Image (tube, rainbow, N blue to C red):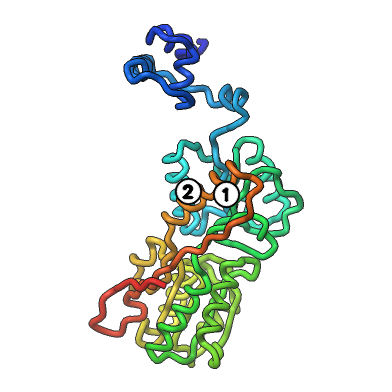
Amino acid sequence: MARRPGPSLHDVARRAGVSTATVSFVLNDSKPVAAETRQRVEEAISALNYRRSLSARALRTGRHHAVGLLLPDLINPFFPALAQAVTQAAWQRGHALILASAGIDHEAESEALAALAERADGIIWIPGSTRIATRPNLPMVVLDRPDASLAAYDSISADHRAGGAAAAALLRRLGRRRVGLLAGPAHSPSATSRQEGFLESWAPQTPLWIREAPFTLDLPRQAVKALADPALDAVFAASDVMAIGALRTLHELGRRIPEDVMLIGYDDIPWAALVEPQLTTIRQPVAALGECAVATLEARIAAPDSPAVHHILPISLIERASTIMSGGTARARHR
């Protein structure tokens, strides 16, 4: 059975007793319309349940009114949370969101960016790799992982260096000295900044060990072996997912947290407050990151030739049971 077409612009105009141009002015808020006329048009739109054709609108205006979002993956719980924040901000500003994930393969990322460029007015990109072969010729904003090689693009991130420094300062204040770093993947600019911030604050001391690991629960063998070092008295992980993986390993080794080993993660994903003991972590301002990314992309679309801007948003240190010996309460400290 053929699908019955929905009401058209002409149907709305006929019901409201106005021209199609007037209906268009109301829909796009492009020209002043008398209040009584606007009300009749809006009532006709509601009565007919009229929905604008986005494809026709794109052909007419050259705008899709959609934002592309490219993520490395949807496995790390931080990325779905960030995607939700971007989606919310985009919808509030009248944009649809098109989501894609491409891992860390630069060819897959290039293809995903090209596909998004055909359907969106601009792209918010969390890089899995900075080695993409071709970059689309449309507005792009780098989110969470700014890098010197991408400095030509607007960027938004939390203050990762300050986050690493806050973790080091807390462990120093708590008297821990034999610290291990689960440093995150070397290709991640945000992980690198967290490590650099920690090391700068920890100097002149040096960590007991530093191990690179992916942002996953399942830690590589060399990281598990390092966690078994009996001298270890604290761990800073570059993500909460890694910290929870370390928590599991330390439990299996019979180490008490925080008495034997204190543990700090990064991101403040919901799991951080659900594990036992609850995880001390560095909170990223997820909602603010999403809002700033969409606002910055809108500004870039409006002024494509303006100089690149780089926004760094403050982090918060959230102290929970994985670093509190006894009788303490969780609290947030802003940096």
Where residue 198 sits in the image (x, y, percent)?
Answer: 52, 80
Residue 175, numbered label: none
Q: CA distance from mark 2 to mark 1?
A: 9 Å
Q: Nearer the viewer, residue 85 or 312?
A: 312
Residue 72 visible in the current orientation = no
Q: Earlier in the sequence, mark 2 or mark 1?
A: 2
In this picture, is 217 found above or below 262?
above
Quarter of the image where one finds residue 302: top right
Residue 124, numbered label: 1
Given the image, on which type of amino acid does mark 2 rest? Val
Circles 2 and 1: CB atoms closer than 8 Å: yes
Q: Is residue 206 left or right of residue 313?
A: right
Residue 86, numbered label: 2
Residue 316 visible in the current orientation = yes
Quarter of the image where one finds residue 188: bottom right
- Quadrant placement of the C terminus: bottom left
Element at label 1: strand
Q: Is residue 137 left or right of residue 27?
A: right
At x 38% / y 74%, what residue is drawn? 280
